[in-house]
Image: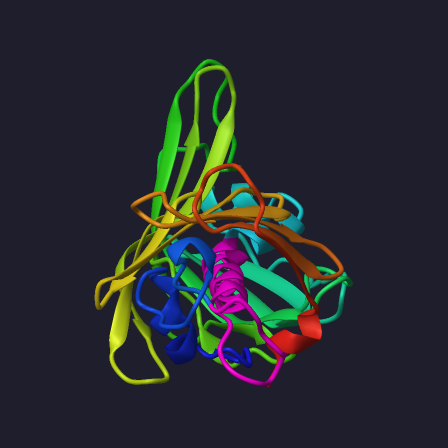
Amino acid sequence: MTSKHTLGALVLCAGLSACGGGGGGGSAFPTAFTPGNGPDADRDTVVLGVALFDAVAGLERMLAAVPSGTERLVGGDVSVSPRIDCAGGGDITTRKAGGVFTLTATNCRLLTTDNLVYDGEWVVTVTSDYASDGTCPAGNVCSANGTVDLTSARFGYGSADDPVFGSSLQVNTTGAGVRTTQVSVANESVPLDAGGTATLSGPRVALQLAGGGLDLLVAGSLPRGNLQLTNLAGTYQATVTLGSQVTAAIDRDANGSIDRMLAIPWSSFVD
C-alpha cells in the first residue's frame, strides 16, 4: 500500500494475536509507541482497516458522485457522460455500450478533507432487469448484477498506486422502491509487501481479511464516515471515525472500556 504501514507490516499484527510485545492484561500489543520508532499494532490495524475499506468502496462512492450514476449502470446503453469534477480534484466520466459500463476516474479525490485518490477504469459487465432508463417500475422488484474488471483501477493516498478489490456488484430495488447498491469481494488475494498474500472476502459492509492465521473484520457503511474493526473471536474492537483526520477508540479486550484513543493524520498514510 502507499501507507507508511505497508500491508506486509500491517497484516503481521492485524490478527490481533500474532504480534509480540508487552501489554497490560495479557494484550499482544506494545504499551508504548513513538511514531517512527518501532511497531504499533493498534495504529497499524486501524490504517489497514481504513485502506481495505477504501480499496473496496471506491466504485460505489464514485457512482454516487455521478448524477444518475447507478441508473446509467443498470439501464440501457448510453453515450459518454459529461465529465464530473471530484470535490478534491480530478474527475469522473462514465459510458455504457454493449451491456458494459465503464467508469473512468482521473486522479479523483472525492473529498477535500483527506488525500484518498482513485484512478483508472472500473469496467462492469452488467445483467439487469431494470428499465432502459435505469428505473424500476413502481411496485416491481428489480435487480442487476455486475462482474467488475479491475485491471487498471487503482487507489492510494496522495497518489493512486495500489490495487483495488471487489469483483462483483449487486443493485436491488424492493417493491417499496428502496434501492441498495453494494460491491462484494470473493476470496481475492491481497499482496503483502513482506511476501505472500492474504485473502479478502465479503460484502463491503462486512469485509474479512484472513491468511496465515490472522484475521480482521471491517464493517463500514456509506456515506463513508465510521468503521468498526473486530476479529473473528470478538476479543478486539476499534471504532474508527474518518474526517479531517482518522480517529479511533481502541477496546483491546472488547469489554466496553476504551483502552486507547488514536488520532492519525491523513499525511501519515503517504510514503
Q: Which of the 4 quarters of the picture holds residue 129?
A: top left
Q: Residue at x 39, y 44 (%)?
A: 206
Place of residue 92 in the rendered image (x, y in percent of width and height, measured from the top left): 63, 64
Q: Residue furthest left?
A: 212
Q: Residue at x 54, y 77 (%)?
A: 3
Q: Residue at x 51, y 24 (%)?
A: 178
Q: How is the image coloured?
A: rainbow
Q: Residue at x 58, y 74 (%)?
A: 33
Place of residue 229 in the rendered image (x, y in percent of width and height, measured from the top left): 46, 50
- Is any atom of residue 202 visible in this view? yes
Place of residue 101 in the rendered image (x, y in percent of width and height, measured from the top left): 45, 56
Comparing 207 with 111, the one in front is 207
Query: Can you say whether 28 is above or below 168 in the image?
Result: below
* Total marks in image: 0
Q: Position of 243 compared to 195: left or right? A: right
Query: Can you say whether 224 is above or below 122 in the image?
Result: above
Q: Position of 181 compared to 207: left or right? A: right
Which range is magenta? 30-59
Place of residue 166 in the rendered image (x, y in percent of width and height, measured from the top left): 37, 58
Q: Quadrant of the C terminus?
A: bottom right
Q: Which of the 4 quarters of the picture holds residue 43?
A: bottom right
Q: Please name the predominant secondary structure of the magenta segment in the image.
A: helix
- Is any atom of residue 150 visible in this view? no
Q: Position of 24 compared to 91: left or right? A: left
266 inside magenta stretch: no
Comparing 212 with 67, the one in front is 212
